[in-house]
């Protein structure tokens, strides 16, 4: 077991090293999603795993989005998003949507439901949400969404662990 802690110097306590935070939190295996929205008539999407189910009554989810991500401004403008939970066959999509800038949706089969955010036909599961609150979280913003539609189908999830993709089958 290796361990790390913040150090203090003459100027005070130094922040915990963010690379160590990444390495440590990389041990938390997650699913992989693509957050989508429609902003000013353009589709936008971003790979995200800082996603959680927040509340059941009311039905809320959250996603944490980097202040520097193009998606951050899009979500503030559109006030809605869909969370597309990916299957193990969608690793290439995850890599594509993790690149900064406009995303190519031309070869993706999708539909819209309540909010107009793209919902991938081949996603393992999805929720379609209206943004109800945006909270500051350091260099990210936390977008809280109320679920207005959702669904799921059979399949196996894509997994992200220690900076690498894997899959999980039962
Ligand atoms: C597996 C994985 C998970 C990610 N999770 C998040 C996340 O939760 N929040 C975030 O802001 N960026 C996350 N990213 C990084 C964004 O996908 C990346 O910064 C993307 O380029 C943002 O696109 P945009 O600037 O066009 O919006 C993740 C990347 C990967 C590969």
Image (cartoon, rainbow, N blue to C red):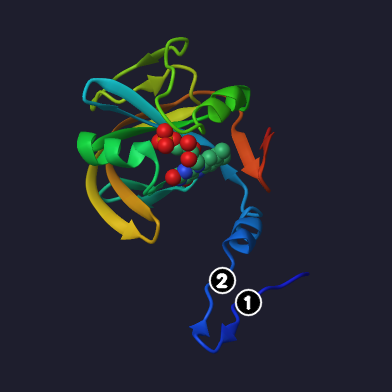
User: Nearer the N terminus, badge 2 or badge 1?
Assistant: 1
Q: Which is more toward the observer, 57 or 156?
A: 156
Residue 154 in percent (x, y) is at 54, 23
| Observer able to see residue 147 | no
Q: Is residue 169 left or right of residue 107?
A: right
Q: Is residue 107 left or right of residue 148?
A: right
| Observer able to see residue 116 | yes
Q: Is residue 154 above or below residue 48?
A: above
Which residue is painted at 60% across and 23% down in the image?
Answer: 92
Residue for badge 2:
16
Q: Which is more toward the observer, 128 or 169?
A: 128
Res. 5 mark = 1
Q: Residue furthest bottom?
A: 10
For the N terminus, the quadrant is bottom right
Q: Is residue 11 above or below residue 37?
A: below
Which residue is painted at 62% across and 59% down in the image?
Answer: 19
Q: Residues within 10 Å of mark 2 (few under 14, many from 20)?
A: few
Q: How many angstroms separate mark 2 from mark 1 (CA)?
A: 7 Å
Q: Residue furthest front?
A: 10
Query: Do the numbered discs 2 and 1 sit on residues whose CB atoms are within 8 Å?
Result: yes
For the C terminus, the quadrant is top right
Which residue is painted at 34% across and 22% down in the image?
Answer: 118
Residue 161 in percent (x, y) is at 66, 45
Q: Secondary structure at mark 1?
A: loop
Residue 66 in percent (x, y) is at 41, 48
Q: Is residue 19 left or right of residue 3?
A: left
């Amino acid at each position: 077991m290796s361990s790390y802690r913040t150090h203090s110097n003459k100027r005070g306590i130094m922040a915990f090293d963010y690379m160590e935070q990444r390495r440590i939190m990389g041990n938390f295996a997650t699913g992989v999603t693509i957050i989508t929205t429609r902003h000013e008539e353009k589709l936008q999407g971003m790979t995200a795993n800082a996603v959680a189910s927040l509340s059941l009554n009311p039905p809320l989810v959250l996603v944490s989005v980097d202040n520097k991500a193009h998606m951050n401004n899009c979500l503030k403008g559109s006030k809605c998003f869909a969370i597309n939970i990916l299957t193990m066959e969608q690793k290439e999509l995850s890599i594509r949507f993790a690149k900064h800038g406009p995303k190519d949706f031309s070869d993706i089969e999708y539909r819209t439901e309540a909010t107009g955010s793209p919902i991938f036909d081949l996603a393992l599961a999805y929720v379609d949400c209206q943004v109800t609150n945006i909270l500051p979280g350091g260099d990210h913003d936390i977008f809280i969404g109320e679920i207005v539609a959702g669904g799921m189908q059979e399949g196996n999830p894509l997994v992200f662990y220690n900076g690498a993709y894997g899959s999980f089958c039962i």
